[in-house]
Amino acid sequence: MDIEIKRLKEDTDTLKQLIRLYAEVFETPVFTMPDDTYLNGLLHNPMQLFIIALKDKTLAGGLTAYVLPSVYRPSPDIYLYDIAVKKNLQRSGIGTLLMHRLFEEGKRMGASEVFVQADSADRHALNFYKQSGGHAETDVMHFSYIIK
């Protein structure tokens, strides 16, 4: 399997493909795709990372992460927000390759830690994070606030 892993920095069309992949994999209800100006701003934001996997030059998976400054130390943390691989390619090692690239980017930035949240009912995600080296699993509750 010929897989290329790279950081996405310029291509709004590929970012749209990644967002559609997230919607498909996470079974997100209908949404409106942000416009190119907004997406281009995300691509050029140094505090946001998009890493993609291409199989034979076609999008196979990707992740979105945020670089968060820490108040406890001068090195940032990285929050893994989304990671998805096309359903027919899951469990083929692509997710692990994406994670390794995220770790490389984090090391280059001087980050101290990568962290991620996972739904306790999502056994596949929990197993993936453990198998890819995740540790210090904690039970937390996630609260969301709608800002009106």
Image (cartoon, grey):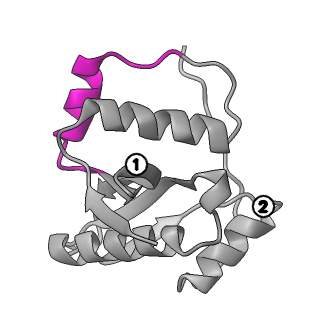
Residue at image location 19% in from the left, 46% down from the top: 9
Amino acid on which the number 2 mark rests in the picture? Asp
Do the residues bearing badges 2 and 1 touch, measured as CB atoms within 8 Å?
A: no
Q: Quadrant of residue 13?
A: top left
Q: Mark on residue 122?
A: 2
Is 48 on the left or on the right of 94, as rendered? left
Image vertical order of residue 105 relative to residue 148, above or below: below
Q: Give coordinates of residue 123: x percent, y percent.
A: 79, 68
Disc 1 marks which residue? 58
Q: Which residues are magenta?
A: 32-49
Depth order, front residue of 86/34: 86
The earlier-in-sequence mark between 2 and 1 is: 1
> Observer-nearest residue: 86 or 146?
86
- What distance separates the C-alpha of mark 2 from that of mark 1? 27 Å
Secondary element at tag 2:
loop
Within 10 Å of the Cα at label 1, are there few (<14), some (14-19), or many (20+) other Cα atoms? few
Are there few (<14), some (14-19), or many (20+) residues within 10 Å of tag 2?
few
Q: State the image coordinates of residue 60 (x, y, percent, origin top left).
A: 48, 54
Q: What residue appears at the point 46 percent right and 72 percent down from the top-left corner?
A: 1
Residue 141 seen in render: yes
Instruction: Pick the quarter of the image with the C terminus.
Output: top right
Query: Position of 79 compared to 29: left or right?
Result: left
Tell me what residue is drawn at x 74 percent, y 67 percent: 124
Q: Amino acid at mark 1?
A: Thr
**Closer-to-camera residue (129/75):** 129
**Magenta residue check for 46:** yes
Q: Horizontally, is 50 left or right of 127 in the view?
A: left
Q: Answer whether residue 116 is magenta in the image.
A: no
SS of the residue at dot 1?
strand
